[in-house]
Amino acid sequence: GVVSNIGVSFVQDGRVYPKMIQTDAAISSGNSGGPLINAQGEVIGMNTIIFTTSQDRRGAGSIGIGFSIPINRVKKIIDLLKENRTIDRNYYVGMEVRDIDAEIARIIDTDLKRGAVVFSIARKSPAENAGFEPGDIVLSIDGKQVLKSEDYLIEMNDGIVGQEKIFKIIRGDEEMEITLELIPRKQSARQRY
């Protein structure tokens, strides 16, 4: 098989797959977690997901599109697990974003066609405390461009409790930075996003 693309990010079934290696190497439903190896015999990734025509897990076979986690990302995850024994992604932001369509662009009076617009913010949430306002347009998170709401989801769902995310936003005509700390979700509260 060959590597046909790198840095592919997508969301599927509520899971986020950031910066994946795309390959047509044969990956079946039974070898997820196995190594993706280059011609020199070096592990370059961990096989994770395939696109399949099957509707259930029995006999699901590859249609030639598979994805692997890059080995450097795998190493970082292993280091985090060794250090903390867990990766806590159960944090709360309190902010919903949407793509900028024609109607939203008219309402917030912008000519921008890229970015993710802050649609709503929960009261007393980390997003409100950080200074976000409805109508803010998110352009980047930690220096990674946000062209649409899916980019926002990919970056945010890859966060870890306690981490600080730096947002570049546009509010009206002003460009600014906002720092948001990912705080643990309160188990007792019913928090949607």
Image (cartoon, grey):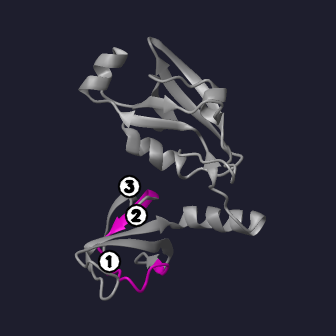
Q: What residue type is labelled 1?
A: Ala
Task: Identify the residue under disc 2.
Answer: 21
Query: Is the Cβ of the residue at disc 1 closer than 8 Å to that at disc 3?
Result: no
Q: Where is residue 146 in the image (x, y as percent from the top left)?
A: 42, 37
Residue placed at 44% from the left, 13% from the top? 172
Instruction: Kindly report which numbered mark, 1 or 3, lies closer to the viewer in this rendering.
Output: 3
Q: Give the amino acid type for the residue marked by disc 2 in the picture.
A: Ile
Residue sitting at the far top: 173
Task: Please report the residue visible at 64 percent of the width from the left and 52 percent of the height from the top.
Answer: 160
Label 1, label 3: how far apart the Cα atoms are = 19 Å
Would residue 10 be seen by someone viewing this image from the given angle?
yes
- Say which element carries label 2: strand
The answer to which of marks 1 and 3 sits earlier in the sequence is 3
Q: Does the magenta stretch include residue 31?
A: yes
x 63%, y 34%: residue: 125
Secondary element at tag 3: strand
Foreground residue among 80 and 178: 178
Disc 3 residue type (three-letter): Phe
Q: Is mark 1 on a helix, strand or loop?
A: loop
Dot 2: few (<14), some (14–19), or many (≥20) neighbours within 10 Å?
many
Segment tinted magenta in the rendering? 16-35
Q: Name the residue under label 1.
A: 25
Please tell me the numbered disc located at residue 10.
3
Magenta segment: does it hold 181?
Answer: no
Badge 1 density bin: few <14, some 14–19, many ≥20, Cα 10 Å:
some
**In which quadrant of the rendered image does the N terminus lie?**
bottom left
